[in-house]
Image: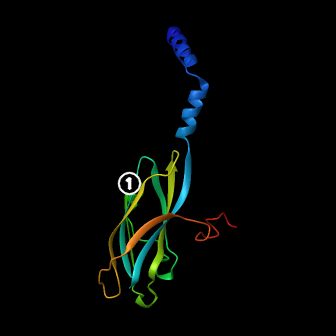
Amino acid sequence: MKRIIFVLSLIAGTIPVSDVQARTAQESIVRFQAIDLYVDSGEHRLVAYQVEMRFDKSRVEVVGVEGGEVEVFKDAPHYDPRGLAGGRLILAAFTTDHKNAPQGRTRVARSHLRIEGEGQPDLGIRLITAAEPGGQRIKAKVDLEPANSDTMTKEEKGGE
């Protein structure tokens, strides 16, 4: 037993402490970021959307999803909670309030991400479907943007 401890102490002494600290620091870099989902319905009123968000599940975990900036999409979209850590998350929402449905580019949701490691992770977004009043499908564009202070609530800013 004493020989094993002696050998282990010799081996441990050959690894520079700075290398261990550097590896530990890189592995422990964790940050949180809010990402906004925008749907641009052009000249059509948007009453429903469904999108697929893809991310590297080894680096990214979706820790929360909330609604958007307009009243009809203020509630969090529907999603399968298993997708939060699975690398693929389907988000969907609809409204029956056709009169107040947004038109043009609108922030419809916000995802909160836990990101490990340095650099920006690869995030993908794909429109599955979008509809206008009456249920007709429309062509729409979707994109993701990091949330900025102009679109964040007081609570997200730390209660300022």
User: In the current view of this chain or complex, which residue is farthest to the left?
Assistant: 136
Query: What x and y, as percent, mark residue 74?
Result: 50, 77
Query: In terms of depth relative to the viewer, which is nearer, 121 or 94?
Result: 121
Please tell me which residue is depicted at 31% across the width and 88% down the height of the picture.
Answer: 134
Query: In this figure, what is the number of numbered marks?
Result: 1
Q: Secondary structure at mark 1?
A: loop
Work out which residue is located at the far front of the displayed protein and give it. 42
How far across and down, in percent of the image, does residue 68 sit?
50, 74
Which residue type carries mark 1? Gly
3 in relation to 95, above or below: above
Residue assigned mark 1: 87
CA neighbours of label 1 inside 10 A, class few (<14), some (14 to 19), many (20+): some
Residue at far bottom of view: 99
* Residue 50 drawn at (x, y percent): 35, 71
| 147 left or right of 88 in image | right
Residue 160, horizontal then vertical, whole percent? 70, 67
**Residue ranking furthest to the right:** 160
Whether residue 8 is visible, yes or no, is: yes
Residue found at x 46% / y 65% = 144
